[in-house]
Each structure stands twice: as structure tokens, then as C-alpha cells.
Amino acid sequence: MALPLCNTDGGAGAPALSELGCVLTNIIQALLATGGFAAAVFIIKSAITLATTQGDPKAIGKAKAELTWAIIGFLITVGAIAIIRLAGNLIGYNLLPSTITIDTNLY
């Protein structure tokens, strides 16, 4: 997902106050991407742990708990995306643009 570019107010490099929506969109996208990535990493980690427990009941229980919490974290992230899209539709501002920019110019 391509992050929208914010205009700056002169040479200071800080976004103009009118670009607050752009800044908010960038922050929300970064947080959601980080949450989704972390959930995926923890799901993979706990699945590997579960596969390598060698029958130890205590380790199996711990790995199942980790997997459960990782899946819950992923579902919370997906739910947050749905809620943010709904809120954006209600206020008339798209907080999560779904445009993907792919540069096909190879030279």
C-alpha cells in the first residue's frame, strides 16, 4: 500500500495543518501494518513451537496459548481496519486508501 505524500508548509518539512488527514492516514496505516506483521510473526513462531514440542504437555499448552493470542491479535487488527473504514465512511474521509502503486518502469 502506498502512503500518500503530505505537502509541507514552507521549508520546515513539517506537514501543514490542512494536511492533518494525510498525517493521520499515514500513522494509522503504519500502526495497522505493524500490528498485522507482528501477528503473522507470532502465529508462525507459535506454530513452529507447537510442531517442535516433542510431546511435552507443558510446552504444548504454552504453544497453544501463544497461537491463540496471536490469532486474537490478528483478528483485532482486522477488526480495527473494518472499524476505521466504517468511521471513515461515516465522516466522509477515507482514512485507509486502498490504492496499491506498482512501478512497472524497469528502466
Image: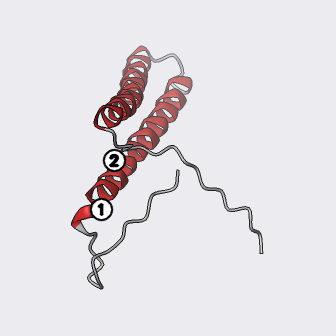
Inter-mark Cα distance, 2 to 1: 14 Å
Q: Residue furthest bottom?
A: 11
Residue 62 horizontal/vertical position (percent): 37, 22
23 or 90, which is in the foreground?
Answer: 90
Q: Amino acid at mark 1?
A: Glu
Q: Disc 2 vs disc 1: Cβ atoms closer than 8 Å?
A: no
Q: Amino acid at mark 2?
A: Ile
Relative to residue 94, is residue 15 depicted above or below? below
How many numbered marks does the figure carry? 2
Dot 2, how many residues are within 10 Å of its Cα: few (below 14), some (14-19), or many (20+)? Answer: some
Quarter assignment of residue 71: top left
Residue shown at 52% from the left, 34% from the top? 44
Residue at the disc numbered 1: 19
50 or 103, which is in the foreground?
Answer: 103
Q: Secondary structure at mark 2?
A: helix
Relative to residue 65, is residue 9 depicted above or below? below
Residue 63 horizontal/vertical position (percent): 42, 24
Relative to residue 106, is residue 24 depicted above or below? above
Nearer the camera: disc 2 or disc 1: 1
Marker disc for residue 33: none
Q: Residue furthest right?
A: 107
Left or right of 23, for residue 36: right
Relative to residue 98, is residue 6 depicted above or below? below
Quarter assignment of residue 4: bottom left
Marker disc for residue 28: 2
Residue shown at 40% from the left, 25% from the top? 75
Which image quadrant: the C terminus? Answer: bottom right
Left or right of 40, for residue 22: left
Residue 23 horizontal/vertical position (percent): 31, 58
